[in-house]
Image (tube, rainbow, N blue to C red):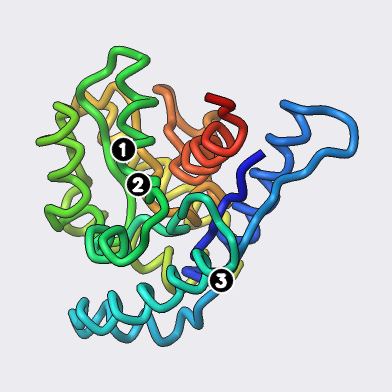
Amino acid sequence: MKTIGLLGGMSWESTAEYYRLINSSVASHLGGLHSAKIVLYSVDFAEIEKMQHAQDWNSAAELLIRGARRVEAGGADCLLLCTNTMHKVAEAIAAAITIPFLHIGDATADCILKTHRKKIGLLGTRFTMEQDFYRGRLEKQHGLDVMVPLEADRQIVHRVIYEELCKGIIQEQSRQEFRRILNVMVDQGAAGVILGCTEIGMLLSESDCSVPVFDTTKIHCEAGVQFALKTA
């Protein structure tokens, strides 16, 4: 079994879920007392959040590159960046290490394409929903037709992520708002919806939507497990 590297803390709430899901999957695949081999480096999200909203992506990249190199030095055989938004600087991180970088967007697109769906709704931070680094990758490299909520609803999703989910706060009112936003996208033709923030799975599940939901946290974790267990 190879060692999975995790660069997390963005937020620690979802990184804890990465740890749980990866170990549960390995135990399911191998049985007995098996668990995953993991090297985890967790950042202080308050530092990253300030850089995000200041649009200081270069400083954020430098901070995460230092973390990625620590993960590699710790013996990891691959790297998972445990956040969708900070894949904004994925190319810089991947270029700074020698181990494979498993991109959350690529893993998610592969999962969606296996279901033969093309038009997909996307929920996430404003950065993820509005900027080209994520939505553009799904469209240009994988041929998906990605739609996002209207401006007012994007504001709601972004606020709930930072003010509630990243702090481990689960509000029923927010769940209802997210369900409404999902339904609007479905009515507009979405054949599935990407939970494109690693915290959204804390609030929503497949039962909250009439079309398939693609939880990027679960998908990314399973990509890491498949890498670790691959024998060839």
Name the one closer to the observer, 5 or 48.
5
| Residue 14 occupies quadrant | bottom right
Question: In the rendering, at what x and y percent does residue 66 appear?
Answer: 40, 78
Label 2, secondary structure: give it: loop
Q: Which residue is the site of mark 3?
A: 41
Q: Is residue 175 visible?
A: yes
Label annotation for residue 106: 1
Residue 28 located left or right of residue 66: right
Q: Residue at x 26, y 84 (%)?
A: 59
The 10 Å Cα crowd at callout 2, few under 14, some 14 to 19, many 20 or more, is: some
Q: Residue at x 50, y 46 (%)?
A: 217
* 3 and 1 marks in contact (CB < 8 Å): no
| Residue 228 occupies quadrant | top right
Q: Residue at x 53, y 69 (%)?
A: 73
- Closer to the chain start, of discs 3 and 1, is 3
**What's the distance in space between the residues labelled 1 and 2, CA to CA?**
5 Å
Check disc 2 and give the amino acid type: His
Question: In the rendering, at what x and y percent does residue 208 appear?
Answer: 50, 34
Label 1, secondary structure: give it: helix
Check disc 3 and give the amino acid type: Tyr
**What's the distance in space between the residues labelled 3 and 1, CA to CA?**
22 Å
Label annotation for residue 103: 2
Question: In the rendering, at what x and y percent does residue 132 appear?
Answer: 12, 53
- Closer to the chain start, of discs 3 and 2, is 3
* 1 and 2 marks in contact (CB < 8 Å): yes
Q: Is residue 70 above or below residue 104?
A: below
Check disc 1 and give the amino acid type: Asp
Q: Is residue 8 visible?
A: no
Name the one closer to the observer, 68 or 128.
68
Question: In the rendering, at what x and y percent does residue 196 appear?
Answer: 36, 48
* 3 and 2 marks in contact (CB < 8 Å): no
